[in-house]
Amino acid sequence: MNQSEVARLREKIELEYQASQRVLTGFTPTARHDFITKRQENIAGYFQDLTRYMSKEEAILLVVNAENGLSGESNASL
């Protein structure tokens, strides 16, 4: 498994979830639905990329952990 690529994809997924969360809590005069939909589409693409390096089950767990903020160091600075 290419751990650096998996780490890069995990970070991208976490950033997408963080962006989605910010749009729900901050002042945003633009269309929230379109913004969140785009973030989810990006995450789906990253998920597909992850399945090249791990099983679908492992990729699902990684995405769920990223959504829940359980994936480790990159969330420590939040």
Image (tube, rainbow, N blue to C red):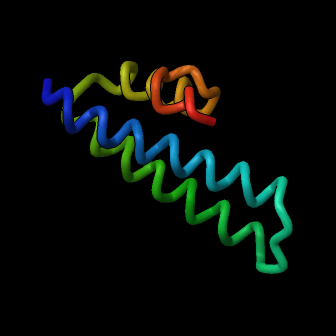
Residue 52 drawn at (x, y percent): 20, 36
Residue 5 drawn at (x, y percent): 21, 38
Q: Can you name the residue that lies furthest to the bottom here?
A: 30
Q: Quadrant of residue 26?
A: bottom right
Q: Residue at x 63, y 36 (%)?
A: 78
Q: Residue at x 62, y 55 (%)?
A: 19
Residue 60 drawn at (x, y percent): 45, 27
11 vs 50, left or right, is right
Q: Can you name the residue that lies furthest to the front here?
A: 77
Above or below, 49 relative to 51: below
Judge by depth and name the residue closer to the eye, 38 or 27. Answer: 27
* Quarter of the rendering occupied by the N terminus: top left
Q: Residue at x 34, y 42 (%)?
A: 9
20 vs 27, left or right, is left
- Circle count: 0
Q: Residue at x 38, y 41 (%)?
A: 47
Above or below, 24 relative to 7: below
